[in-house]
Amino acid sequence: MPFLEISDLVVDHDPRTLVRLPVRRADVVARLRDAGDLRGARIAAALPCAPDGTLDPVAVDRRLVAVHTELQRLSEELRLGARVAEVLRPLLAALRAGEVAGPLRVVDVGCGLGYLVRWLAASGVLGPGVDLVGVDFNAALIGEADRLARAENLDCRFVRGDAFALPEPATVYVSTGVLHHFRGPALDAFFAAQAQSSPLATAAGTAATPGPAAFCHFDIAATRLAPIGTWIFHRARMRDPLGRHDGVMSARRTHDDATLLKAAARAEGLVPLVYEPRTRSNPFCTTVRPVLGLRPDLVPALQTALDRTASGRLTGDLADVLARPTPRTAR
Amino acid sequence: MNALLLAALALIDAAFAGFRAYAGRDGRIRKSGPTRSAALRGLTIGALALTVTSAFTTAVLLLGGNPAVRYAELDAAAGRMLLVHAPYTAIVAASLACYFWGPFRASTLAVVIGLGPLTLLRPLVVLVGAVAAAWGSLPAAAVAVAASAGVLLVEPLTHRKWYAHPV
Ligand SMILES: C[S@@+](CC[C@H](N)C(=O)[O-])C[C@H]1O[C@@H](n2cnc3c(N)ncnc32)[C@H](O)[C@@H]1O
């Protein structure tokens, strides 16, 4: 039985032109019902729609912005910005220590309201000379991200675009809470698209090879506790039933490390790794963790930097990851 | 004394309720000012609820027979309510301390097994506190219901008045 998120179903675009396509409410309800998700079907059935049965795009956008604003509260409480910075800072330091000319660019793929990018801009933790960009295919979320950034005068920008045809080249691609949206071949394609993205133009000219120097994608850790923990947390912190529903579904369908490592290996030229707690940790302490892809020359530098500063370590040993007990087999 | 301790707890709780009523409604990054004003708004609603509860308690105290006997009855009920609220308060305080001052992983633990579940448990704790206070005393039951309803109403009222829509 597939786990579906309502917010994935209520907005549709032409992937090439990004023109918004009408969505029939009955289709959304039917898909949820077919997946055995009666609660989700009830939530979708209550969404406003036009007489012809298509969902009201303005109402859907308003609802999604409100849900994402609530979602940001969870990111704030979990200190998501600081968690990402714990890995990004040494990564950028390693890049700066190498021969990377010109500014560095961090692109957040599927940025939603751009919390991560705006937090990085507001906190300044990455230092000067880092171009911060958020990309999402949802126009309403990108518009709100941009409005919020301007309201606080933050040095970052937001661009509408598809994760599979990235409009922005990057030194490092990042994301939070996005990986579980892509399954099977789409997950492979997500990583492959980054490796094939156009090279970043720098002061010294355009980089010779396509793709970023690295990627670092955070998502809910597939621990045994994730579904119940997510239920408690969303119940306690979110009001909108749609947000609660989608939050719980996210945890149910989050990928385990083995699946992520295998898919990340599709990004040619980058070494796939996961970042995990240094010591055997109890699942209460692990809420999100990243899968990384690094240009080979960056691996030792980042390894050393993380050894000095961070609480986690990098591992890319698939045999080791596969041998670990995980709550579900690799999908 | 018991009543004063409960009143102080209710006011602290109201400030947190104000914060929760606002949380998730403001997408900005820097918001310590709005957070403070949300806590103040919760505190204001909490103080109003407390005023109503105090007036009601005074009426219960003065209108039924011997005030000294009634006072002792209500004070004993407040003591029973405190017995329920005190451990909860201590666990919340410990979780908050872990969250704000502990190392990164401890703060995650504080959120996952502390602050999140404790928010969910809060109405239940208030209910158990009310039942404990009401045990065996009709006047205490009336006051406990009024006080507990006041405590539980702060968050929804603050939310509805100021934070019904994203700010
Ligand atoms: C669960 S949200 C996470 C948002 C944000 N990163 C956060 O942590 O709050 C997933 C986001 O991915 C975006 N998304 C999904 N598929 C996408 C695609 N193919 N291209 C670009 N964005 C996509 C959605 O619009 C949504 O904003």
Image (spheres, rainbow, N blue to C red):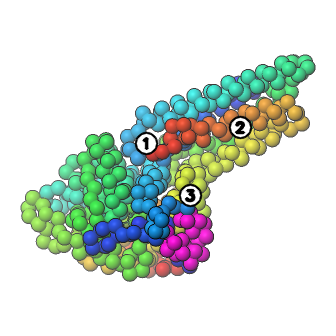
- Residue B97 in which image quadrant: top right
Tell if the residue under mark 3 belongs to the same chain as the one under mark 2. no
Which residues are the magenta region? A25-45
Q: Which residue is mark 3?
A: A241
Vertical side of A66 occupied by A39: above or below: below
- Residue B73 in which image quadrant: top right
Q: Secondary structure at mark 1?
A: loop
Q: Is residue A43 magenta?
A: yes
* Three-letter code for the amino acid on which mark 1 is drawn: Val
Prevailing secondary structure of the magenta residues:
helix
Q: Secondary structure at mark 2?
A: helix
Q: Which residue is mark 1?
A: B167
**Residue at x 43%, y 76% (from the top left corner):** A183
**Residue at x 89%, y 36% (from the top left corner):** B136
Q: Which residue is mark 2?
A: B149
In this view, the residue in front, A108 or A205, is: A108
User: Which chain contains the residue that carries disc 2?
Assistant: B
Residue A68 visible:
no
* Three-letter code for the amino acid on which mark 2 is drawn: Ala
